[in-house]
Amino acid sequence: MTDTNIQLTSLISEDNKLTLALKSIDMPQPGADEVVIRIEAAPLNPSDLAVLFSVADMTTAIQEGTEQSPTITADVPAKFMQAVKTRVGKAIPVGNEGAGTVVAAGSSPAAQALMGKTVAVIGGGTYRQYLCANVQSCLALTQGTTAEEGASSFVNPLTALAMVETMRAEGHKAIIHAAAASNLGQMLNRICIADGVDLINIVRKVEQETLLRDMGAKYVVNSSSDTFLADLTAAIIETGATIAFDPIGGGKLTSDILNCMEVAAARDMKEHSVYGSDTFKQVYIYGALDRGPITLNRNFGFAWGVNGFLLFNALGKLVTKTVMAMRKRVADEITTTFASHYTHEVSLSEVLQLKSIAGYAKQATGEKYLIIPQK
């Protein structure tokens, strides 16, 4: 190890300002059940942007500092300050997950067993050069797996697996997934093909349709098509899908999905009911790509639910044996089923450049950024 340790922090101050900066911090010393990881790769996920930018108006962002140690400042609208009062004045470390080499280990057998190994880690603050983490937060990668390959071992893979497990636990038999050409969507597609689960993929571009069909997807519908609702309904009738996962959030897609589910369910009704069918229809919203209001046009009866879906909450509902099996599957299949593809690699300092922010803040499907902290 060296004596240098840099981390990226996000601070909201009382004067309604967001400041993103690189901070020099002490080298960590591991406790008995901890290891020190030389972070070599960490992905920029949408959930990371929520911590990084919070509620700041990034159209006001200004880059200052030096090339090697830049800072970004932006205005936080006064109307949002109450919502973030608990983080005002605190420089919050950013980064949910990453991967690297264990360079120091505590005295416990579990910690010593990871010494020198490449591991993935989750738990926060991974946008730094060296991180101290409990062994329970680490996933030992199979020999030969690189940090870049294992950097996204938790958020997307476990979310995709948790979707399938939630479907099974709640008694559904097929899934609808929106923004399905994303890295997570591609993982979910591979899982469902391997596990024999019908999956309806919703995309918005013709090239995304082609991408998923070339991967073996059977059901792909385009939300920008004039026949979208008819196509979605037909796929629901064929698969019997009654659960959906939507990372978009705002707009009327959730409503469209519920209405199409109801149309499919109503085909089996023997008698008309003003309350609609008794088939329960569930949509989970797990993102906020559209931060506008969720519009529900109530043509889908009364047997329905719209809920948030958060990975750690979902995992908490599963038995330990299932979660451990999920983690093992991710490690075994990180270069196949759970492979992530990145279009940009940036250093910690490059994360804080307006040119980079303009790119990764779009959260565009097919464009994923990977941070290389040692760069």
Image: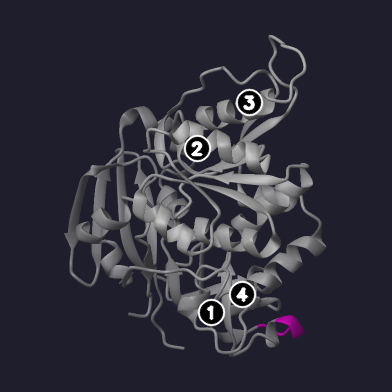
The residue that label 3 is drawn on is 262
Q: Which quarter of the figure has residue 282?
A: top right
Q: Nearer the viewer, mark 2 or mark 3?
A: 2
Q: Position of residue 347 (x, y in %)?
A: 31, 72
* 175 relative to 193, above or below: above
Q: Please name the residue shown 73% across and 42% down the image.
A: 172
Q: Position of residue 122 (x, y in %)?
A: 57, 65
Q: CA distance from mark 2 to mark 3?
A: 14 Å
Q: CA distance from mark 1 to mark 4?
A: 22 Å
Residues at marks 1 and 4 touching, judged by CB atoms closer than 8 Å: no
Q: Earlier in the sequence, mark 3 or mark 4?
A: 3
Q: Could you say which disc has been placed on residue 333 in the image?
A: 4
The residue that label 2 is drawn on is 231
Q: Earlier in the sequence, mark 2 or mark 4?
A: 2
Q: Earlier in the sequence, mark 2 or mark 1?
A: 1
Neighbor class of circle 2 (other Cα within 10 Å; few <14, some 14-19, many 20+) is some
Q: Earlier in the sequence, mark 1 or mark 4?
A: 1
Q: Which quarter of the figure has residue 262?
A: top right
Residues at marks 2 and 3 touching, judged by CB atoms closer than 8 Å: no
Look at the numbered disc 3 and give the secondary structure of its residue. helix
Viewed as shown, does residue 305 lie left or right of 223?
Answer: right
Please state, as top left, top right, bottom left or bottom right, where the C terminus lies in the image.
bottom left
The kind of residue tagged 3 is Glu
Q: Earlier in the sequence, mark 3 or mark 1?
A: 1
Region in magenta: 106-110
The residue that label 1 is drawn on is 37
* 343 relative to 103, above or below: above
